[in-house]
Image (cartoon, rainbow, N blue to C red):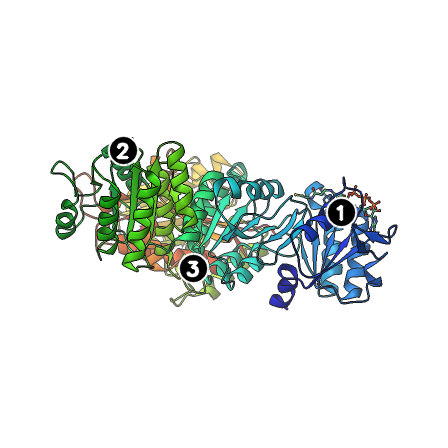
Amino acid sequence: MKSDHLQALLHPTSIAVIGASNNSEKIGYAVVHNLIESGYQGDVYPINPKSEEIQGLKAYPNITDVPENVDAAIIVVPAKYVLGITEDCGKKGVKALLVITSGFSEVGKEELEEQIVDTAKSYGVRLLGPNIVGILSNKENMNASFAGFLPLPGQASLISQSGALLVAMDAATYTRGIGFNEMISIGNMSDIQFSDLIEFMGDDEATKCISLYIETINEGRRFIETCRQIDTPILALKAGSSKRGAAAAASHTGSLVGATKVYQAAFKQAGVIQASDVNNFFDRTLALTLQPSMRGDNLAILTNGGGVGVLASDAAERFGIPATEIPQDLQEGLMDYMPDYGAAKNPVDLTGMANTERFHQTTKLAFSHPWVNGLVVIICETQLLDLVEIVKGVHRAVKETGIKDKPIIVSLVGGDSALEAGRWLIEHGIPAYNSPDLAVNALAALRDHGRYGSPGPVLTSSENSNDSQTAREVIAQARERGRTGLTEIESRKIFAAYDLPVVDTRLARSEEEALDAAQDVGYPVVLKIVSHDILHKSDAGGVKVGIQNAQELSAAYQSLLKNAKQYKADAVIEGVAVQEMAAEGTEVIIGSVNDPTFGPTVMFGLGGIFVEVLEDTTFRVAPVSNSEAASMLGEIRAAAILEGARGKGPLDREALAETLSRYSEMAADLGDDIAETDANPCLVYEQGKGVKIVDARVILKEV
Ligand code: COA
């Protein structure tokens, strides 16, 4: 059903326009006009109860009156008629609807939108929108929209949640010289989702880059899974960076999570490259469309200007592909084409003496050198140079090498002739930008794609044997008692069921039991009051650390009970936790939340001011493998601390990554029940000495 219906949507053999009009001020006029003007080869059936002919085509009062089969229908009548029309389309056997009409969930009319989707589904009809501009397809010469013209032809495809942005980008394709194969307005996404279209486009040879403008995603996990299976580069510009629900969060992790961070994590896991703004979206689309991905970190920069070379190096470092010194043999080869005062280390400064011949020879030399994974050529305009001739030389050099599996990007810095030369290059398949940092940024997108490679079909599933049964029993018991906040003892039991290294803790219901427990755990111990009426134990004087012997334990036991009663007279005390006293270590925090879009998501950060003040955290949709967890450890700004700082040796990152991975499995496995969790603090010791979770906290979803 999938491809058949999307085929009808994107490559229809016939289209009905319901609400077609002869009034040139109406959208129903524009859509028919655009279909005809764009050269669409299929049949077009205008539907209008009042007209027999629309723009020279025979019109029908209702879609059911059309004698031939109709593949797709574009709906451009007011919202109140759309439900009835959907029913008619279903009866007629239309396969796909493009609902341009606005006035549904975007203005609070969710119910009407749902009814329309349900009706469409009951007939097996797929629905794009509502609230869309339509579809623009160069492949089909089909402008099935009310945007004035098809985009400049090319090999990128756009799926946009904003209609206005799509129309603006359509126009900009000509000024920017960036071509598109298809532009699809996805609107309210009541039925057809990003994933449906990405899946379909992934098989399309004519699309070399799938560019997405995203405000929200439905079915987040499906999005990740779908993107992971697509080899075509996917680029996303995500709008909306507000913090979500931070104030209402019950856990530490909950208060740190922001929609942006989770989306960024999900994109990374999906292998989706990100754009920072509209310009960057265009710039990166251009590179991803025209050039292959960069399959290693070795970047070479060739230039005729020292300053722009330095700017490019700065950018390279910023975007994660630092320009390191190029190999000696390549340096020596390049020296033949530059004066003695040139520099061949990287950036390679050919100096102001560089002419077409020198750019041609050095490009050829550098591009064909096996060390080079990607090349940036930066050309500054000077009075002596004909920039078009130079870029032709660069282009010829690339052609002569015959290499097709590594990228080259050019930056032309100057005025009109730089623009002209840039346009020539783009037309001939080499992306060109007017500043060095933009060129390096574009190459970084190709490097991102090269790094992602093919992430494989699924989010990592559990490799460990977990005792989820025990965890679920603990949850069920808490639910029976009507609680969503679990006690420390309960939380620990759940953590332990996933083999997480929680400090040894026993529940004691009397002083005698506490003494026995301390004997088992081994002194020194910590005592903590256990009561679901007292969530902030320290505030209630409910924690005593460093208890060295039985005598101290008895005294601590009595004072804890007394403090608890004073703090809250009617608190139900379940007992006292006797806990192993963990040795000092570096504090980190691990946590999880249940993200509304992507579901269970894990967080990692260093403890103390690093999370409190700097919010130095990193996220992933759960579960994550050990190696993915290890890369999370390297992502925080304070990563150097884990490697050993201030004379300390490296910490046990291996054990930490394993703990993080197990933790993510727990979050994913119990995702139906758990809202938020924290392991805070979690202590990391030096290499080989492991990790200890000191405090465990689990909060269940409300049911
Ligand atoms: N079947 C077929 N045609 C019908 C019909 C029906 N059941 N009911 C009405 N029509 C005809 C009308 O008679 C009219 O044709 P006419 O010009 O010959 O009289 C045509 O369909 C359009 O109907 P009308 O009532 O004039 O609506 P409109 O053109 O003013 O507005 C929309 C219709 C869909 C454009 C409008 O409701 C809308 O949603 N606009 C916003 C679109 C938008 O911005 N989308 C999102 C972009 S991001």
Q: Earlier in the sequence, mark 3 or mark 2?
A: 2
Residue ID at (35%, 32%):
414
Judge from the rendering whether residue 2 lies leftward or rightward of residue 233; answer left or right. right
Q: Label 1 sits on what residue type?
A: Gly
Q: Secondary structure at mark 1?
A: helix
Q: Earlier in the sequence, mark 2 or mark 1?
A: 1
Dividing the image into four quarters, tell me where ligand 1 lies: top right
Q: Secondary structure at mark 3?
A: helix
Q: Label 2 sits on what residue type?
A: Leu
Q: Residue 628, labelled with which disc?
A: none
Q: Nearer the viewer, residue 124 or 543?
A: 124
What residue is shown with label 1? 28
The image shows residue 320 at horizontal and vertical percentages of 31, 45
Residue 586: name its quadrant: top left
Residue ID at (84%, 57%):
60
Q: Earlier in the sequence, mark 3 or mark 1?
A: 1
Judge from the rendering whether residue 549 lies leftward or rightward of residue 143; answer left or right. left
Q: Residues within 10 Å of mark 3 (few under 14, many from 20)?
A: many
Q: Label 3 sits on what residue type?
A: Glu
What residue is shown with label 2? 384
Q: Is residue 254 visible?
A: no
Q: Nearer the viewer, residue 671 or 324?
A: 324
Mark 3 vs mark 2: in front: 2
